[in-house]
Image (cartoon, grey):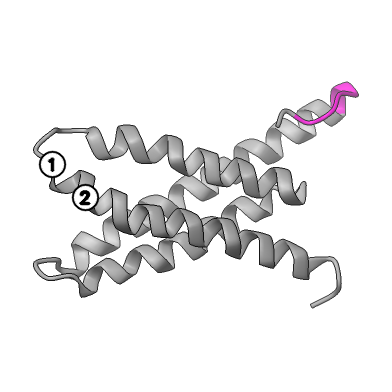
Amino acid sequence: MDGREAPLIRTALFWGAAWGTAEATFGHLLHALPVPGLAGSVMIPCAVYFMVRALRATGRSSSMALAAAFAALIKLADVLLPGRGILMALRPALAILTEGLVATLAASLAARSAAFRGRRGVF
């Protein structure tokens, strides 16, 4: 690991841990409420917040995918909760990974488009 990647990993670990903790606590509680779509309506904006913070701190879109990977690992701890099967923990973790990959792709494309036009990045 060179000196340039250590801050990227530390930053992604920090924001991913914050995101994963929010998903594992608040997301679990929101899914327990009998309101369809409530968890997604609350947790997706939280995910965007944590990914944008990682992106702004590092300036590299790959930090969002790394943060998502760390968050998904933490979310997998839900499998240890009573009444939760492996699929009940695996599906949200896969959703977190998907959100991270889509956001990384979108940020990369936006940065390339902005650079092509001679502008500063979108975020």
- Check the picture and name the quadrant holding the N terminus: bottom right
Q: Is residue 117 left or right of residue 108?
A: right
Q: Amino acid at mark 2?
A: Leu
Residue at the image position 53 percent from the left and 49 percent from the top: 101
In the current view of this chain or complex, which residue is farthest to the bottom?
Answer: 1
Q: Is residue 28 left or right of residue 32?
A: right
The quarter holding residue 72 reads: bottom left
The residue at which mark 1 appears reads as 33
Residue 18 location (% of width, % of height):
49, 57
Q: Tell me whether the residue at label 1 lies in contact with that at label 2, contact meaning CB atoms closer than 8 angstroms.
A: yes
Judge the density around disc 1: few (<14), some (14-19), many (≥20) Cα neighbours within 10 Å: few
Residue at the image position 19 percent from the left and 46 percent from the top: 31
Residue 35 location (% of width, % of height):
13, 33
Indicate whether residue 51 is drawn in magenta: no
Q: Which residues are magenta?
A: 116-121
Q: Amino acid at mark 1?
A: Leu
Query: Which residue is more in the foreground, 85 or 108?
Result: 85
Residue 41 location (% of width, % of height):
32, 32
Q: Is residue 68 left or right of residue 41?
A: right
CA separation in Å, label 1 and label 2: 7 Å
The residue at which mark 2 appears reads as 29
Label 1 secondary element: loop
Query: Which residue is more in the foreground, 12 or 93?
Result: 12
